[in-house]
Image: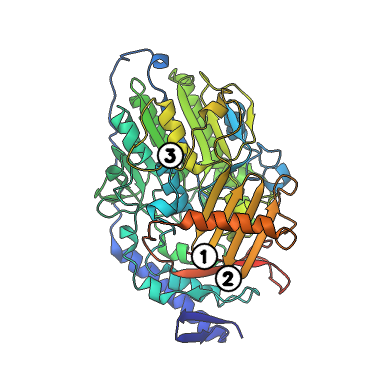
């Protein structure tokens, strides 16, 4: 009988039939009721963005470049058609993202900072590993860990036990207070001090309490994703797709509302339209209002993260894709692609294209829990794993004045490289009182780098699940299950052949590198609250068998 461990001393059978399922439904209803009572959502309000000078003090090409970072959420490498794929066997293309990739540098071996969102975002903004910041796990809404593990263990899908770390959960602060420490220096702070106007739109996920908000981390203004619905569930123009086999999705539908907030402590209000389009509309306002001075815009999209919601227009446009959730998901990707196209078109209209750096990426790989098999093809694994499917992401950098079209770079790059790269482009200075782990990618992108690349090694970790890539060797180690995976990515980029048993010397060398990486580390800020089993080669919609490889993700 499948069970759920909800504490070190409590084990509850999950297969208790209708009564158990009714209990889960009741708890989800309670979550929804409590959320509805927690805060009021006012009608939409106009956003008053700062207005730059009416006239340019210098020609745009003579001043530091504008910087735009567009970050998608949970976008699979095969969701975009740049690499010859695209959703529904190529039926759904992403022409605007493809043009962004073609118009500058395409880093074909690019990696997120982690297999989940928040640590990746922290690394992107600080250029530093969790071993230095302590920000290692993704904060989850209060009660989500216990609820999601309970729901997971009621599903008869063949996965091992879901484990709730009650002792850890009892020690963590509230969701809003789990943030990136204000002692860290962010990209926004550096560019602001360089004279840039800095604005954030969208997802943050680095804390909302004192010292954690975007405005306290270098952004002068922030339009924040206060909750996670793209449109009201009953909106006439929305198409919803609930994923009943996924506990995360079930919790989010109960927890999420259609809500935004502007600046720290501002009132909560309804967005004006479909979330992806609304954020794009506001981004365009920022570009137009600040075209006569350097600006940094961090557009952190929620798409294509669950809950799966698309506009009816996008749903119809992508065609007859089965199953329904895959069609809604494809429509959401279409909306992200449209956003990229509108941003690029605005830059062209305002005469800002040549001297604006636009960087596009995703916070991690596509999620297996949405039940769509090919989003990370040809790579194995998903979000919540460190296989290539979980951490291999698009990374495109466009700066027409300095980066040639169709520049292809196969040197490994990662989110920790964003800060040193963009600081160098702005001719600003890196902090001198701390180590920055990232590297400046501009010489590679601009064709100015000669000789060997300065960095051969990248690290990832989530608790006891740790990974190192050194040159083309990649070692994954985990305590649950206790296992090592060693791959030679030069001949096996999709991680099919585990060489750990055949190459003990390589395992020993890379293990020593992992241990050295942990020496003197900053303690983890917040413990993980759950251990989530993930099948490496199957989505959550598929039945797992004892022969399938699985790994636990501590978070």
Q: Is residue 501 above or below residue 379?
A: below
Judge whether 100 appears above or below 490 on screen. above
Left-right relation of 424 to 242: left
Tell me the distance, in whole angstroms, between the alpha carbons under discs 2 and 3: 36 Å
Residues tagged 2 and 1 counted as in contact (Cβ below 8 A)? yes
Q: Is residue 48 visible?
A: yes
- Image quadrant holding the N terminus, namely bottom right
Q: Residue at x 42, y 41 (%)?
A: 436
Query: Could you say whether the residue bearing mark 1 is in a helix, strand or loop?
Result: loop
Cα–Cα span, label 2 and label 1: 8 Å
What is the crowding at mark 2: few (fewer than 14 residues within 10 Å), some, or many (at least 20)? some
Contact, mark 2 vs mark 3 (Cβ under 8 Å):
no
Left or right? Give the position of 11 relative to 381: left
Q: Position of residue 340 (x, y in %)?
A: 52, 34
Q: Give the secondary structure at mark 3.
A: strand
Mark 3 crowdedness (10 Å alpha carbons): few <14, some 14-19, many ≥20: many
Q: Nearer the viewer, mark 1 or mark 3?
A: 1
Numbered disc in front, either 2 or 3 = 2
Residue 309: % across, % down: 52, 52
Q: Which mark is residue 299?
A: 3
The answer to whether one can see residue 278 in this image is no
Q: Is tag 2's residue or tag 3's residue first in the polypeptide sequence?
A: 3
Q: Which residue is mark 1?
A: 464
């Amino acid at each position: 009988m499948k069970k759920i461990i909800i504490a070190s001393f409590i084990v509850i059978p999950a297969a208790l039939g209708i009564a158990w399922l009714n209990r889960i439904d009741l708890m989800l209803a309670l979550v929804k009721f409590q959320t509805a009572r927690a805060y009021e959502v006012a009608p939409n309000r106009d956003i008053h963005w700062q207005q730059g000078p009416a006239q340019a003090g210098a020609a745009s090409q003579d001043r530091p470049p504008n910087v735009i970072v567009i970050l998608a959420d949970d976008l699979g490498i095969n969701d975009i058609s740049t690499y010859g794929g695209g959703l529904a066997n190529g039926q759904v293309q992403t022409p605007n993202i493809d043009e962004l990739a073609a118009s500058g540098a395409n880093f074909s071996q690019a990696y997120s900072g982690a297999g989940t969102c928040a640590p990746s975002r922290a690394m992107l903004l600080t250029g530093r590993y969790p071993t230095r910041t302590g920000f290692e796990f993704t904060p989850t809404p209060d009660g989500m860990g216990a609820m999601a593990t309970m729901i997971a263990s009621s599903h008869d899908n063949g996965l091992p036990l879901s484990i709730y770390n009650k002792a850890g959960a009892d020690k963590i602060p509230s969701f809003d207070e789990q943030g990136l420490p204000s002692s860290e220096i962010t990209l926004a702070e550096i560019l602001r001090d360089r004279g840039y106007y800095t604005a954030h739109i969208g997802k943050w996920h680095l804390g909302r309490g004192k010292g954690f908000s975007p405005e306290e981390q270098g952004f002068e203004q922030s339009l924040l994703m206060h909750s996670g619905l793209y449109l009201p569930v009953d909106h006439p123009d929305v198409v919803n797709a609930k994923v009943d086999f996924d506990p995360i999705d079930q919790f989010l539908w109960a927890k999420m509302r259609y809500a935004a907030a502007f600046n720290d402590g501002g009132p909560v209000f309804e967005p004006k339209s479909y979330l992806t389009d609304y954020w794009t509309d506001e981004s365009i306002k920022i570009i137009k209002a600040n075209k006569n001075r350097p600006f940094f815009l961090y557009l952190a999209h929620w798409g294509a993260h669950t809950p799966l919601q698309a506009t009816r227009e996008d749903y119809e446009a992508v065609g007859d894709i089965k199953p329904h959730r895959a069609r809604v998901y494809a429509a959401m990707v279409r909306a992200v692609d449209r956003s990229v196209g509108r941003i690029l078109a605005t830059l062209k209209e305002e005469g800002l294209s040549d001297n604006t750096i636009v960087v596009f990426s995703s916070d991690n790989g596509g999620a297996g829990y949405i039940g769509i098999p090919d989003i990370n093809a040809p790579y194995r694994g998903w979000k919540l794993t460190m296989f290539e499917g979980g951490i291999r992401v698009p990374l495109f950098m466009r700066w027409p004045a300095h980066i040639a079209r169709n520049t292809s770079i196969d040197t490994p790059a990662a989110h920790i490289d964003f800060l040193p790269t963009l600081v160098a482009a702005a001719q600003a200075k890196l902090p001198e009182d701390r180590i920055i782990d990232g590297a400046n990618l501009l010489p590679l992108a601009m064709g100015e780098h000669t000789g060997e690349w300065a960095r051969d090694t990248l690290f990832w970790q989530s608790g006891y699940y740790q990974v190192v890539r050194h040159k083309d060797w990649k070692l994954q180690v985990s305590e649950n299950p206790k296992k090592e995976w060693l791959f030679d990515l030069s001949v096996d980029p999709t991680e099919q052949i585990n060489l750990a048993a055949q190459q003990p010397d390589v395992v020993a060398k890379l293990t020593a590198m992992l241990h050295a990486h942990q020496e003197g580390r900053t303690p983890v800020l917040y413990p993980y609250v759950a251990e989530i089993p993930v099948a490496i080669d199957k989505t959550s919609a598929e039945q797992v068998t004892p022969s399938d490889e699985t790994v636990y993700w501590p978070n």
